[in-house]
Image (cartoon, coloured by chain):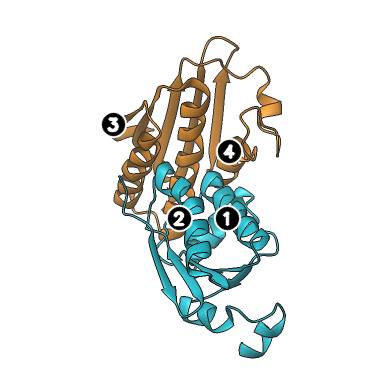
């Protein structure tokens, strides 16, 4: 088993942090854990912290993208935070796209923009 | 070309995909690849390991550390006795999938590595060899 997913509520935002190299069952748990917690805490936005993640293969990428879609259907916004340079390079070369999901360099910045409408993030840069 | 070191990881369960990734990371770091190259190699291993599990359920990944005129390298060989690939060109096309995935496994792994060779026939299993070189 890999390290578990961490789920924390920060004000009205749900902060979900993924471990460095999650196995498939841990990645599969991402959707359930996240959606349950969004509903339970009545969170306005999801910040998905990938700062520790060392590998993002097509399976993991699909789960991230689907989770963002599901959160959107529930009325929440998703911000993917902290992707490392090596991860951004390999994911792009692999062909991974995350659609229109918002991203931020750090969790701190993601928490700042969480809950704000799309487009208002620009003034924070 | 000489092999300096070698090993294998059996792929019999979903969790073995992560085991294979960890073994590959360790070997790639030992060869001296940088962070981005390590991420490329480990990602390719994950895609190819998942293909073995998804299509053949069981197989093995052999790894080798190579030394040649151009530098040190890593070779990963994924072998299974699964259903095989009817048309390798189809399987290498972007977005082509028979397994319900995104269809980026094989073409993605090919892009991430320096060399890829596939041998497969329907009913006779699949052998995929990929290599990455660290130039002197």
Identify the residue under disc 2: A33
**Residue at horizontal 45%, vertical 40%?**
B45
Identify the residue under disc 1: A67
Q: Secondary structure at mark 4?
A: helix
- Please tell me the numbered disc located at residue A111: none
Q: Position of residue A35 (x, y in %)?
A: 53, 57
**Residue at horizontal 35%, vertical 48%?**
B25
Q: Chain of mark 3?
A: B
Q: Secondary structure at mark 1?
A: helix
What is the CA distance from the residue labelled 3 to the residue labelled 1?
A: 37 Å
- The crowding category of the residue bearing disc 4, from other C-alpha atoms within 10 Å (few below 14, some 14 to 19, many at least 20), is many
Q: Nearer the viewer, residue B1 or A26?
A: A26
Whether discs 4 and 3 lie on one chain: the answer is yes
| C-beta proximity under 8 Å, tags 3 and 1 | no
- Please tell me the numbered disc located at residue B105: 4
What is the CA distance from the residue labelled 4 to the residue labelled 2?
A: 27 Å
Q: Please name which of the two marks, 3 or 2, marks the residue nearer to the observer.
A: 2
Report if residue B66 is visible in the image: no
What is the CA distance from the residue labelled 2 to the residue labelled 1?
A: 10 Å
């Amino acid at each position: 088993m890999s390290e578990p997913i961490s789920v924390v509520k920060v004000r009205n935002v749900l902060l979900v942090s993924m471990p460095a190299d999650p196995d498939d069952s841990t990645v599969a748990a991402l959707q359930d854990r996240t959606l349950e917690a969004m509903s339970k805490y009545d969170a306005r936005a999801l910040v998905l912290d990938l700062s520790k993640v060392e590998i993002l293969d097509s399976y993991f990428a699909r789960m991230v993208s689907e989770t963002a879609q599901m959160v959107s259907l529930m009325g929440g916004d998703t911000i993917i935070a902290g992707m490392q340079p090596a991860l951004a390079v390999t994911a792009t070369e692999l062909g991974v796209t995350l659609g229109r999901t918002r991203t931020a360099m750090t969790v701190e910045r993601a928490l700042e923009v969480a809950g704000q409408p799309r487009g208002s993030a620009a003034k924070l840069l | 070309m000489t092999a300096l070191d070698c090993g294998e990881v059996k792929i019999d369960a979903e969790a073995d995909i992560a085991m294979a990734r960890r073994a590959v990371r360790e070997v790639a770091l030992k060869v001296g690849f940088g962070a981005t190259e390590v991420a490329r190699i480990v990602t390719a291993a994950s895609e190819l390991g998942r293909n073995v599990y998804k299509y053949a359920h069981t197989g093995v990944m052999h790894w080798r550390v190579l030394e040649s005129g151009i530098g040190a390298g890593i070779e990963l060989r994924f072998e299974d006795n699964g259903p095989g690939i009817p048309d390798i060109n189809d399987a290498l096309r972007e977005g082509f999938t028979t397994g319900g995935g995104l269809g980026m496994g094989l073409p993605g792994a090919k892009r991430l590595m320096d060399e890829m060779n596939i041998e497969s026939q329907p009913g006779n299993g699949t052998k995929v060899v990929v290599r990455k070189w660290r130039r002197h």
